[in-house]
Image (cartoon, rainbow, N blue to C red):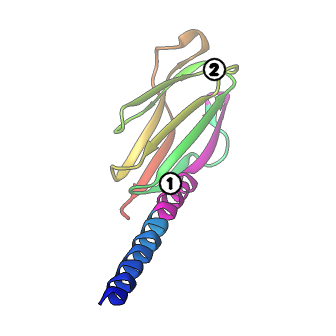
Amino acid sequence: MTASFTDTAATLAFAAIAIGSSLSLAAPQQTQDAAAAQTRIEIRIENHKVVGDNVIRLTEGQSVEMIWTTDAATELHIHGYDIRIDVSPDAPAKISFIAHATGRFVVTSHGFGDQHGHGHETLAYIEVYPD
């Protein structure tokens, strides 16, 4: 009876170690996968307009990092997400968020250069599609 108790105890100990090892290995992998899933988008503004396509397409739940550069200082506003950030030629702006709301959202400038804080120019659209 002692041998079978020892065998059972050894089996349980091995199982606990194996399960514990797999759980501890899984957690860092999930963290790395989440960080790798973030989409990085670079947007350049020149002469008060977005260079290239001014429609940014995302999927609901997508994690995104937007890097905005400009040739004139302005405040950017992503309507619907209520994100506001200043960007200038010497200080690009980084915006990170999760696209939780679906729809079409306008990105506006609140003035450029001397008009900073005044005016309301449409620069781009962010379209978030259901997952």
Residue 126, magenta (yes or no): no
Q: Measuring 48% from the left and 44% from the top, which residue is drawn there?
A: 125
Region in magenta: 24-48
**Where's residue 128, x and y in %?**
41, 54
Q: Measuring 48% from the left and 60% from the top, which residue is drawn there?
A: 24
Categorize mark 2 by other alpha carbons within 10 Å: few (<14), some (14-19), many (20+): some
Going by the image, does 26 lie left or right of 48? left
Element type at marker 1?
A: helix
Going by the image, does 10 lie left or right of 69? left
Q: Nearer the viewer, residue 83 or 27?
A: 27
Q: Quadrant of the C terminus?
A: bottom left
Label placed on residue 88: 2
Task: Work out whether 98 lies above or below 28.
Answer: above
- Amino acid carrying label 1: it is Thr
**Where's residue 32, x and y in %?**
55, 55
Task: Work out whether 28 lies above or below 46.
Answer: below
Q: Nearer the viewer, residue 74 or 120?
A: 74
Label placed on residue 102: none
Q: Nearer the viewer, residue 35 or 82?
A: 35
Residue 34, magenta (yes or no): yes
Determine the CA span between mark 1 and mark 2.
33 Å
According to the picture, the residue beneath numbered tag 1 turns out to be: 31
Which of marks 2 and 1 precedes in the sequence?
1
Q: Measuring 67% from the left and 40% from the top, which residue is drawn there?
A: 51
Discs 1/2, front: 1
**Where's residue 9, x and y in %?**
36, 78
- Amino acid carrying label 2: it is Ser
Name which quarter of the figure residue 77 lies in.
top left
Q: Measuring 51% from the left and 35% from the top, which residue is drawn there?
A: 95
